[in-house]
Each structure stands twice: as C-alpha cells, then as structure tokens.
Image (cartoon, rainbow, N blue to C red):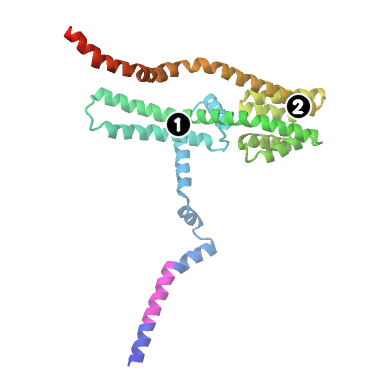
Amino acid sequence: MPLLLSIGVFLLVAGGMTLLASRLWLRPRAVIERITGADVAAATQSQKHPSLAFRELLARLGNVLPASPRDVTVMQQRLIRAGYRGPSALKYLYGSKVLLAALLPLFAAIAVAGSERTAGNKAMLVALSAAAGFFAPNEYVRRKARRRQRQIRRGLPNALDLLVVCVESGLGLDQAIVQTAKELEHAHPEISEELALVNFELRAGKRRVEALRNLADRTDVEELRKLAAVLIQADRFGTSIAQTLRSHSDFMRVQARQQAEEKAAKLGVKLVFPIFFCILPSLFVVTVGPIMVRVVRELLPVIREM
C-alpha cells in the first residue's frame, strides 16, 4: 500500500510539473507558429522595444505638424550640423515639438490649478509653457549644433597635423583623410565622422572639389571652410598638397595664438565687474568692519555723554 501511494504521488507530481513546463516554458504553439511563419508580425510587434515605440509615436506626431519646404530645408541643415542625419530625424523633431507643446501646458495647468493666481495669469502661464514646449526642440538642436562645431574646431589642429604627416609620408590626400579619420575616431569623434563622410562621398564617385565643399557646408565651421578652399585651390592649380597643408597649419597655429592673446587682453576688462561686486564688498567688510565696531562701542557713548 505505501508503495502504490508513493507511485501515485510521483505520477501526480510528474504530470503536474510536465503540464506546467509545457505551458510556461515549452510553449509548443509559439514554437509551431515560429517554425511555420504564422503570426510573425504579431510576434515582432510584441517584442518591440519601448524606445522604438516612442520613436514611432514621435514620427507619427511629426506628420501632424505641417511645414513649408523652406523651413524643412533649414531644419534639415540644422539637424545635420547637430549630428542627426537619419531619414526620420526631421519627423522626430516635429513630433517632439507637438508632444512637448501638448504636455507642458497640461503640467502647467495642473501646477497652477490650486494656486491663488488670477485666471489671466494662469492662462498666460499655460500659453507660455505651450510656446516653450514648441520652441524648446529648436533651441536644443541649435545648442547641440554649436557644441558640435566647438568640438570640431578643437579637433581640427590635430587633424591637420595628422594630414600633414600622412601626406608627407607618401600617402595621397584621399588615403590621408581615411587614415586621419581612423586615428581620431576616439579622441575627436566629430571631425573623424566628417572626414569619414568625405571618404564615403569620394568612394561614391563624387569629385574631390564637391566633397570638400559639402564638408564645409555640412559643418558650417569657418576653419573647415578655409581648409576646404585651400585644398580645392591646391588641387586646381596642381601645387604640392603637403606644402599647402603645412602652410595652412602654420597659419592656423598663428591664428590660434592670436585668438588666445585677444582673450587674455579682454580678461582684465571682464574681471572688473566680478571684482567690483564680489571681492570689494567682502574686502570692505574685513578691513572697515572692525573699525566700525570700535566706533560704535567707544565713540558713540562719548558723543552721547557730551
């Protein structure tokens, strides 16, 4: 009897575990659908990452906002200068404008609902939050583009020195651009990306002059524009690329030194206001404060007795 009871309990537990495993882990229906290709779209949709769903929402919201072709061209140039070159970057921008213009007024209305402000002030705050949400993505893109341009200016001297070394060692200009982009991939990724794009355009069949002009227009950095003009002239007139790059490198080094001297000369004028408003009051308190304390303690009682 105990043997039969043990066998029955074993079979019951084994059957329950098998059924539970087939329902939770094995999922034969899902396996069959995956093998046969049935309901692949549903499976893909169920495994979609939340960030992809958010991007899809932004893209759909971006289609809601109408824009003129002129504005689209300007915003595309700004996005490219900021480093966003995806085909859906413009839709993401417009979608974020619509989303923020809808969410920020809602949060502002909830925040001022229980306050004691007048109805006019509340409506003004909601309207200002809507305007801020609509124009905030533009400001973000503008700041990102300016930051990227500063990074490109910072990495341009190193890139120019590497170009000079590569060209003087016997490489052609195209190979020198490729090698410079590889060497600066981690130290200065922004200018490395731009030089890699120049290489891709040259591989695609564009002329070197056109690729260099696209580099200048794409970044909108004055130093890169000068470098592109120098290389185009050297290529057009057949002068030495190495000598041209070295001369331009010396010119940029002198220009950087002059800019540093100009900033140092302006430093004295810029320090006037911090010294006047921050340092001089504390200096007066330290120097004149003890004397004023002695005057109040010793001289005022004498004056009162007189």
* Residue 286 seen: yes
For numbered disc 2, what is the local secondary structure? Answer: helix
* Residue 204 seen: no
Q: What number of labels is visible?
A: 2
Pick whichever, 214 or 281, lies toward us. 281
- For disc 1, the marked residue is 65
Crowding at dot 1, Cα within 10 Å, few <14 / some 14-19 / many 20+, comes out as few
- Magenta run includes residue 23: yes
Residue 146 — which label?
none
- Residue at image coords 18%, 9%: 304
Q: Is residue 290 left or right of residue 228?
A: left
Amino acid found under the numbered disc labelled 2: Arg
* Residue 173 lies in quadrant: top right
In the image as oriented, which residue stretches furthest toward the top?
Answer: 306
The segment highlighted magenta reads 11-24
Q: Position of residue 150 (x, y in %)?
A: 58, 28
Pick whichever, 209 or 303, lies toward us. 303
* Residue 281 lies in quadrant: top left
- Residue at image coords 66%, 24%: 225
Q: Is residue 29 above or below residue 150?
A: below
Q: In this view, does 90 lie to the left or right of 126?
A: right
- For disc 2, the marked residue is 246
- Magenta run includes residue 205: no
Q: Mark 2 or mark 1, which has the lower sequence index? A: 1
**Which corner quadrant holds the C terminus?**
top left
Q: Is residue 183 above or below residue 222?
A: below
**Which corner quadrant holds the N terminus?**
bottom left
For numbered disc 1, what is the local secondary structure? Answer: loop
In the image as oriented, which residue stretches furthest toward the bottom?
Answer: 1
- Residue at image coords 45%, 48%: 50
Pick whichever, 122 or 57, lies toward us. 122
